[in-house]
Image: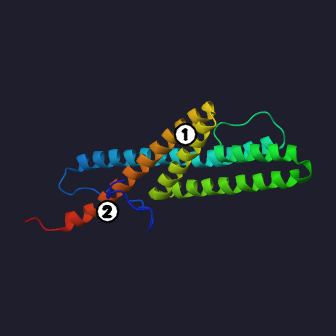
């Protein structure tokens, strides 16, 4: 990330309304403002769609865990690989040691809930346009995908790549939106300064 991107703290850029430039004719200002507002709306939508992938990953990871622990033969490829591996280990251990089976299942489910909760938090922060947690969540999801490469779950890996592309698109949209809003906040200050 370059130094011009906003840090995740103290917070996202507040929503700024496009400012009219007093030197331009009124019709040009209205058209420019309308185009800028349309661009801002498009970036907000693109960013939101990208950030919401964290919610899908978290939710489907929990569903996958329940499916595995209740003996279903299907799972969603969107979920977290680390949860799927933990669940598979727990099921294997429960089969080998039936007396402790409930403990193994409980630990794996608790792990999946914790991991999914962390991903939900990344989604919430990403939707608030905190870019550092957004990027960190993407990096962790990439590492999760690398675990799946190790176990050769190629369909899961392919979907991780697709989800990362969608997340990246949302990240770039929010970064551009933050830059536009910083420029809009500076614009009135530049107009007030007397011309030399």
Residue visible at 33% across and 60% down?
Answer: 182
Q: What element carries label 1?
A: helix
Residue 99 seen from this side: yes
| Direction right: furthest residue | 99
Do the residues bearing badges 1 and 2 touch, measured as CB atoms within 8 Å? no
The residue beneath circle 2 is 185
Q: On the rendered image, what quadrant is the C terminus found in?
A: bottom left
- Residue 110 vs 167, above or below: the answer is below
Q: Camera-side residue: 130 or 119?
A: 119
Relative horizontal placement of residue 139, taking residue 184 as reference (left or right): right
Q: Using a 10 Å C-alpha cutoff, classify the residue at mark 2 as few (fewer than 14 neighbours), some (14 to 19) or many (20 or more).
A: some
Q: Where on the picture, by quarter, is residue 21?
A: bottom left
Q: Distance between the residues labelled 1 and 2?
A: 33 Å
Residue visible at 73% across and 42% down?
Answer: 64
Point out the frontmost of discs 1 and 2. Answer: 1
Q: Is mark 2 on a helix, strand or loop?
A: helix
- The number of callouts visible is 2
- Residue 136 vs 188, above or below: the answer is above
Which color mode does the image show?
A: rainbow
The residue beneath circle 1 is 163
Q: Earlier in the sequence, mark 1 or mark 2?
A: 1
| Direction top: furthest residue | 155
Q: Using a 10 Å C-alpha cutoff, classify the residue at mark 1 as few (fewer than 14 neighbours), some (14 to 19) or many (20 or more).
A: many
Q: Position of residue 83 (x, y in %)?
A: 69, 47
Residue 80 seen from this side: no
Q: Where is residue 156 in the image (x, y as percent from the top left)?
A: 62, 35
């Amino acid at each position: 990330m370059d130094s011009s991107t906003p840090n995740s703290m103290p917070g996202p850029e507040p929503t700024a309304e496009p400012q009219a430039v007093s030197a331009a004719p009124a019709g040009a200002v209205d058209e420019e403002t309308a185009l800028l507002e349309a661009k801002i709306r498009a970036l907000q939508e693109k960013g939101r769609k990208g950030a919401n992938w964290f919610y899908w990953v978290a939710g489907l990871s929990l569903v996958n865990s329940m499916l595995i622990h209740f003996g279903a033969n299907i799972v969603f490829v969107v979920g977290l690989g680390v949860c799927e591996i933990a669940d598979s280990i727990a099921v294997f251990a429960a089969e080998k040691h039936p007396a402790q089976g409930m403990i193994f299942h409980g630990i794996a489910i608790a792990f999946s809930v914790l991991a999914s909760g962390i991903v939900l938090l990344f989604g919430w922060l990403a939707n608030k346009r905190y870019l550092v947690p957004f990027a960190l969540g993407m990096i962790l999801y990439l590492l999760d995908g690398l675990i799946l490469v190790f176990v050769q779950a190629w369909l899961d890996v392919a979907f991780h790549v697709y989800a990362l592309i969608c997340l990246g698109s949302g990240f770039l949209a929010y970064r551009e939106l933050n830059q536009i809003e910083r420029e809009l906040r500076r614009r009135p200050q530049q107009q007030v300064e007397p011309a030399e």
